[in-house]
Amino acid sequence: MTDKPQDNYKTLKAGISWSAFERFAVQGMQFIAFVFMARVLSPTDYGLVGMLAFFIVISQLIAEGGLSQAIIRKLDRDEADLSTSFYVNIAGGAILYLLLYVTAPYVALFYDEPRLTGLLRVMALCIPIQSSLVVHRAVLTSRLDFKTQAKSTFVGALSSGFVGIYMAYNGYGAWAIVCLQLTNQISTAVTLWLVTEWRPMLLFSTYAFRRLYGFGSRLLISKVVESLYNSFYILAIGKVFSAYALGCYTNARQLGSISSENLTRIVNRAAFPMFCGYQNDPHKLCGMVSEYIRLSLFFIAPLMMGIAALALPLTTALIGHQWLYTARLLRILCLYFLFFPLNSINFMILEIYGKGGLYLKLQIVNIVIGLSLLAVTIPFGLSAVCIGLLASAALSFVINASMAGRRINLGLLKQCRLILPTLIMATLMATAVFSVQLVAVGEWIQVVLGITIGLLTYGGLSMIFQTRVCVSVFNLFKSRHSLRDASA
């Protein structure tokens, strides 16, 4: 065992702290901008931009080429690996932007929405900009240096928030959302280049490219397949329903994912490079992953169940009554996002062991299930589609835990035993929170009382029935403890 995993443990708390700051500070500013903008923009404006997500997300993944995770996972990376990856990413981003620029009119024709041509050509500029940052972020992540990344994303979120709010209140409609995203990318890129020491050298190695791409290509295919699946829902909703329905759906996803995805990615970014150092010690890795699951669900389950219980008053209080349909979808999607950290950690296990082939096979199985449920539910409306998403996430967890978890002796039944107590407590808490709406009058009063009762209920139940987890949470925030200590 090298010294690197031990060093990673010493810096894990700092890594998680700065990763948390980056996610929550940035998401907090973006959320404030979203609240102000959503009050004056229409669901149709968000729907128009949402129609382009399919093409932007897929292009960004292809431009990255899976090289970011390959760099992080490669413990003996050198300058040839980094510079080669940088030039590949830059070339991929430029080519994909030109492709989207040329095909933009056909995208507009597909949706029968002429405004999409100009929106896509401007929004696609985010792709080459983001491609220039892939290696910088991979290097910083491998060092658990989230402080530097936080500086750049904070500047990006702050500057883009001002631009988005100004344009929204001056009647720019969907262009306000596009310019917000573009400003975010530009500001983040400029800041990251200024605060990061690494610079590419005039060096390109075909050997280094083949080694990195051997792992990265399999991961790329898996990520592209996953994103194609997720984006296909947006594509189908925009085509079958309307821009209004798509706007309500995308904002419901955004509100629902704030807690689940952020908390999961905060820990994942710090945990992945650390866990990779223990790929030869499955017993130790099993203990750490078990604690990861307990702690993740301990925070995420009450958040998602609480948001689901308060969906109606929370949505109308924040962004107005024109988003009532979003609140209905949000209740379902919050339950869907409960499974996000569980499926994420199981796929992370496969990444740690370099099982790109199995990763891809599981993705394909999950996608077949999801698309089958989409085909069955889409004739019954958008709420039915969201219920289908929830069912597909639950089935995916069953499959992923059975196949990936068993590699470290942490199969489906063991994972279910880890999360069941927390889910029961979160359900009881959500019931108490929802009951507030039956007696309290006024949206903000319902929200404040609901949050208060939820905290008291969940905190009390946790101290009585989840004492061990409470102790682990307390220890995690003490400077001399880490996730490794909690898993011991």
Image (tube, grey):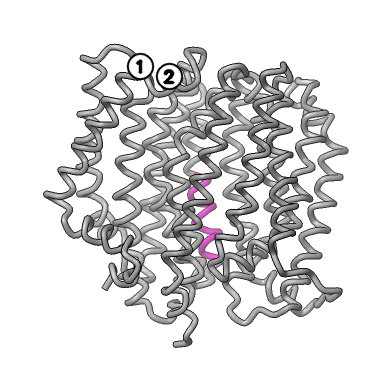
Kind of residue at disc 2: Ala
Which residue is labeled 2 in the image?
317
* Quarter containing the C terminus: bottom left
Percent coordinates x, y for residue 176 in the rendering: 70, 26
Segment tinted magenta in the rendering: 357-368
Question: Which mark is on residue 381?
Answer: none
Percent coordinates x, y for residue 304 in the rendering: 36, 38
- In magenta stretch: residue 366: yes
Is there a contact, CB below 8 Å, between mark 2 and mark 1? yes
Q: Which residue is painted at 24% across and 48% down in the image?
A: 422
Q: Is residue 281 above or below residue 358?
A: below
Q: Which residue is painted at 80% across and 56% down in the image?
A: 92
Task: From the viewer's perspective, tell me whether residue 441 is left or right of residue 167.
Answer: left
Q: Which residue is painted at 50% across and 33% down in the image?
A: 253
Q: Main secondary structure of the magenta part?
A: helix
The residue lying toward the viewer, choosing from 315 and 161, is 161
Q: Quadrant of residue 313?
A: top left
Task: From the viewer's perspective, tell me whether residue 73 is left or right of residue 51.
Answer: left
* Quarter containing the N terminus: bottom left
The residue lying toward the viewer, choosing from 209 and 268, is 268
Which residue is labeled 1 in the image?
443
- In magenta stretch: residue 325: no
Q: Which residue is painted at 86% across and 45% down in the image?
A: 98
Secondary structure under tag 1 reads: helix
